[in-house]
Image (tube, helix red, strand yellow):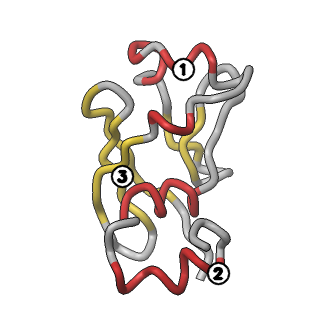
Amino acid sequence: MFLHVTEAIYLYDHVIEVVFNDGRKGCADLSGAMKGPVFEPLRDAENFSKFRVDKELETIVWENGADLAPEFIYFQTFKADPALEPQFRAWGYLP
């Protein structure tokens, strides 16, 4: 199954509530992903909050062209769930 973001709501700072096409819902702190030139403007929470769910890419995107892979957002949302460790390891997010 390919993961897709179906809904996302800004909560505060760099934290969003996100719903995936597998039915799981949770909160992701994306502050650690705001590195590099394309994400520099998004370090400001006001700019960060202006994302949307792109229906074609099926992930969150910003007006400046920045986006994050749904798998990365999923990992950030559920990284504390030990049942998902094998999947996160297969994606390369865990050693």
Q: Amino acid at mark 2?
A: Ala
User: Residue 18 has which mark?
Assistant: 3
Q: CA distance from mark 3 to mark 1?
A: 18 Å
User: Residue 42 has which mark?
Assistant: 1
User: Residue 75 has which mark?
Assistant: none
Mark whose residue sits in front, 1 or 2: 2
Give coordinates of residue 87: x percent, y percent.
54, 82
Reading the image, the residue beneath label 2 is 90
Seen at 34% across and 73% down, the residue is 23
Q: How many marks?
A: 3
Give the secondary structure at mark 1. helix
Q: Amino acid at mark 1?
A: Leu
In the current view of this chain or complex, which residue is farthest to the front?
Answer: 95
Give coordinates of residue 1: x percent, y percent.
59, 83
Tell me: residue 81, above or below residue 33. Answer: below
Seen at 49% across and 30% down, the residue is 51
Mark whose residue sits in front, 3 or 2: 2
Ranked by sequence position, the earlier of labels 3 and 1 is 3
